[in-house]
Image: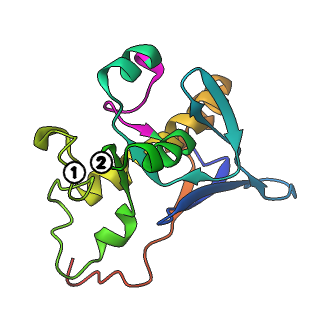
Amino acid sequence: MATARYSIGIDLGTTNSAMAFVPLDGDAATEVFSVPQWESVGALGEASTLPSFLFRPEPAVAAELGASGGLGGWIVGRMARKRAAETPGRVAHSAKSWLCHHAADRRAAFLPWGSEEVAPEDKLSPVDASALILNFLRGAWNSRFAASGDDFAFDAQAIAITVPASFDSAGQ
């Protein structure tokens, strides 16, 4: 593997996630990555934070969004946060908190919590929900930088991800 070009830091947050990067060569300043995300059906935007919300759209909304709609049928970010107020049973949130909840099986698919609107086979575990958020950030990075060459791809960089303060590595 080639030497990383960038150091990428990801704050996988309970409410919002963010990503920053700095070139490993030279003296450039750290930059916050502006994350492209759906604002609403038909409206894309960018923001310095990505709400850590995942929305499972109804079939009509999924059809409108088409293949660009999301990861595994889930929409990540601002649109998901907005839809939490409109259709709370279709939105998973607080996955990071569930990762370290003493009474929760972090690999069990129960998100959105208490929802009867999302089929059991479509629900997410806290691990899977967190992975979708991280994969969304990975895809956003690659969309912006990977065309510059393999050594610009996300997987070729030095990456640090925060973990919850209450994370118990021995018990998990």
> Toward which corner of the image does residue 90 lie, by quadrant?
top left
38 and 33: which one is in front?
38
The amino acid at mark 1 is: Ser
Image location of residue 107, percent across then percent down? 17, 60
Question: In the visual, does 106 lie left or right of 160?
Answer: left
Relative vertical location of residue 51 with respect to residue 122 in this rendering, above or below:
below
70 and 91: which one is in front?
91
Q: Is residue 3 rendered magenta in the image?
A: no
Residue located at (36% from left, 50% from top)? 88
Looking at the rendering, the stretch of residues picked out in magenta corresponds to: 66-75
Question: In the visual, does 18 lie left or right of 96?
Answer: right
Q: Earlier in the sequence, mark 2 or mark 1?
A: 2
For label 2, the residue is: 89
Image location of residue 160, percent across then percent down? 53, 63
Residue located at (23% from left, 84% from top)? 170
Q: Secondary structure at mark 2?
A: helix
Residue located at (54% from left, 41% from top)? 154
Q: CA distance from mark 2 to mark 1?
A: 5 Å
Residue 53 visible within the image: yes
Residue 134 visible within the image: no
Q: Is residue 72 rendered magenta in the image?
A: yes
Image location of residue 54, percent across then percent down? 40, 46
Chief secondary structure of the magenta portion: loop
Cβ–Cβ under 8 Å for marks 2 and 1: yes
Relative vertical location of residue 93 with respect to residue 39 in this rendering, above or below:
below
For label 1, the residue is: 115
143 and 40: which one is in front?
40
45 and 163: which one is in front?
45
